[in-house]
Image (cartoon, rainbow, N blue to C red):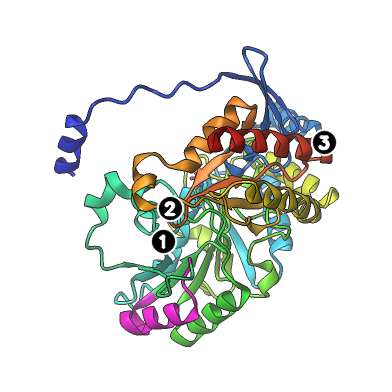
Amino acid sequence: MSAVTAADAAAPAAPPPRRPVAVRARGARVWDERGREYIDGSSGAVCVNLGHGVPEVLDAMRAQAERITFVHRSQFAHHAVQDLSAEILSIAGPGHREVVYTNSGSEATETALRLALHHHAADPARAVVLTQFPSYHGMTAGALGVSGHPPRRRHLDALHDGSATTVPVASGDPGRLLPGLADWRAAFARTGPERVAAVLLEPVGGAASGACEVPDEVLRGLRDLCDASGALLAVDEVMTGFGRTGWWFGHSRSGVTPDLVVTGKGLSAGYTPIGACLVGDRVLPNRPATDLAFGHTMGGNPLSAATALAVLAYTREHDLPGRAERAGAVLREGLAETAASVPFLGAPRGRGLLLALPVHQDAEGFARAPLAARICAAAERNGLIVYPAGVDHRYQAVLVTPPLTVDDADLRELLARLRAAVAEVDA
Ligand code: PMP
C-alpha cells in the first residue's frame, strides 16, 4: 500500500470536476441552480428506477419517519422490515428463505461472500470465488477484490494482488466479450471443483462491461456446474434487480434459482440507502443467516425498509418490468439509428432499459481520451445525463438507462439530445 500512496503523492493534483448543482427533480428530469433542465438518462447511477419525486414513495417516507425512524434489529422487530422481506421473497419466488439487509450494494456483495464462506466453514479449503471478467461488485475492499475492474481496483491492488481466492474468468475467444460455458468449465477444472466456494456474476453487466449480457444457457450451465461441484451460485442483481431488464431480476428469464442474490440500487430506487442479500434454501440450511454475528448498524432500518416497500408496491402496481421492456424496445430502435449515423458507435446491446451503445476506439486512443467520456460530456452540454462504462477499449460504451417510468416524450427528447451530442463529437 505504501508504494501506491507514494505514487499518488507524486502525481499532480487534478482539479476537482465542476458539476452542476442539482436543486430539483421530477420524473426523468433534473434541474440545476441556474434553471437548466436535464433528462436523467442514467437514472442517477442506474438506481432511480421510478423517476424522481414519486408522491406515493414520498408519502410513505414521511409517514414512516413520523412513526419511527430507527430501532436496532437486535432489540426490536419491525413491521416494515418484516413486510419488506415477505415482499422480496414473494418476488424472488421459491428457493429463497431469508433476506439480510445492508446499506448498499457493495455491502450486500460482502454479505454474499461471507455467507458463502460460512456455508463451507467445515471445508476451509473451499475458499475460491470464481467471478467474471470484466465485472463490478462494489467499492468496499472485499467486493472490489472480487471485481474484474482494473481501473477501479488500481488503488487497492496491494490488498488483492496474488490473492488465490478470487479467480476472474475471462472469455478465451477474442470474438466474445464475456466468458462462455467452456471458459467456466475450464476455470472449475483449473481451480479444482472441490475448492470453489461460489461463482459470482452479474446477469447483465453495468459499469464494467457496458451492458454485456450473460446468455441464459450460460447461467443454466453454471447452475449445473455449481450443483455438480457443491459450489454456491451467487448473482449480483444490484443494477439489474427490480425491473430494470424487463424482468424482476436479470436471471429470471433463465429459470435458474441462484443460492445468493445481491441487490441494492433499484430496491429503494435511490430514495434512501438500502441493500439486501437474498439467501437461498440450500445456504446454511440449519441456521438462520440473520443469526450470524454480523450486520450493519443501519442495515434494514425502518425508514429505508418502508421506503423500499413503497417502491416495490409501485413497481408491481405499475408493472415497471413490463414498462421497461416496452420502453426499452423503443429506446433500442432510436439508439440503433443514432449509432448508424457515425462510424464510432456499434449496435446497441443490453436488455430492457439497461442499454448501452458500444464505442469503437483503439487502445491507444482510449488511454489518451476515452470517446465515451467525451460523448457523455457533450450530452451534458445538451441537457442529457448518460454514463460512460467499460474497463478498457474493448468494452467501452455509453450506458443509456433512464427511469423505468420514462414516457414517449422523454424518450424522444433523450434521443434528440443524444444525437446532438454524438454529432458534436463527430464534428
Ligand atoms: N454491484 C453492481 C453490479 C453495481 O452496479 C454496483 C454499483 N454500481 C455495486 C455492486 C455496488 O453498489 P453500491 O454502489 O450501492 O455499493
Mark 1 surroundings within 10 Å by alpha-carbon count, few (fewer than 14), some (14 through 19), many (20 or more): some
Question: Mark 2 is on which residue type?
Answer: Phe
- Mark 2 → mark 3, Cα distance in angstroms: 47 Å
Q: Is residue 417 above or below residue 131?
A: above
Horizontal side of 20 relative to 119 (left or right) equals right
Residue holding disc 1: 114
Instruction: Check the image and name the residue furthest to the top.
Output: 34
Q: Quadrant of the C terminus?
A: top right
Q: Give residue 294's mark.
A: 2
Residue range in magenta is 177-196
Q: Is residue 175 above or below residue 362?
A: below
Residue holding disc 3: 409
Which SS class for mark 2? Answer: loop
- Mark 2 → mark 1, Cα distance in angstroms: 9 Å
Quadrant in which residue 86 is drawn? bottom right
Q: Main structural element of the magenta stretch: helix, strand or loop?
A: helix
| Front-most of residues 104 and 52 | 52
Badge 2 vs badge 1, beta-carbon distance below 8 Å: yes
